[in-house]
Amino acid sequence: MDLLHSTWFWIVIIGAPLGTVLGTLARLSQKQPPIELPPGVAPGTYARREQAEQDENAASR
C-alpha cells in the first residue's frame, strides 16, 4: 500500500508543474484583442530605426 501512495504522490508532484506550464502556454498562444485606448488617444506606430537615427542626428547638430 505504501508503494501505491508514494507512486501517486510522485505522479502528482511531477504532473502539477507540467500541467501549469501547458496551461500557461495554451493561454499565451491565444490572440488577445486590441487594447481599448482612452477617448482622444490615437494609436501610434514605432519609428523605424533609420528614421530614429536621422532624428537623433538632426537634434544633435
Image: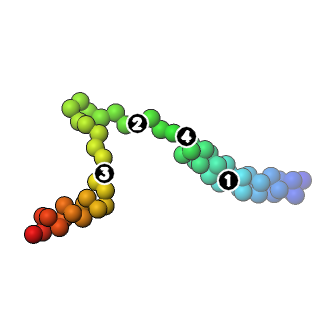
Q: Which mark is residue 51?
A: none
Specify the label residue 34 is tagged with: 2
Is residue 40 in view? yes
x then y, percent, for residue 14: 72, 57
- Of the numbered discs 3 and 1, the one sitting upstream in the chain is 1
- The residue singled out by tag 4 in the image is 30
Q: Secondary structure under badge 1?
A: helix
> What residue is shown at x 31% (from left), y 56% (from top)?
48
- Rendered-image quadrant of the C terminus: bottom left
Query: Alpha carbon of mark 2 to alpha carbon of mark 4: how far?
Result: 13 Å
Q: Residue at the spot x=54%, y=46% of the render?
A: 28
- Above or below, 41 against 18 in this view is above
Query: Alpha-carbon distance for marks 1 and 4?
Result: 19 Å
In this figure, which residue is indicated by the disc labeled 3? 46
Distance CA(mark 4)–CA(mark 3):
24 Å
Mark 4 or 3 closer to N-term?
A: 4
How far across and how far down the image is residue 45, in percent? 30, 47
The amino acid at mark 4 is: Gln
Q: Which is nearer the eye, 24 or 43?
A: 43
Q: Is residue 20 visible?
A: no
Distance from Cα at disc 3 to Cα at disc 2: 16 Å
Confirm or deny contact between disc 2 and disc 1 (CB under 8 A).
no
Rendered image quadrant of residue 42: top left
Q: Residue furthest left?
A: 61
For marks 1 and 4, the one nearer the N-term is 1
Q: CA distance from mark 3 to mark 1?
A: 37 Å
Specify the farthest residue to the right.
1
Seen from this angle, which residue lies furthest top?
Answer: 39
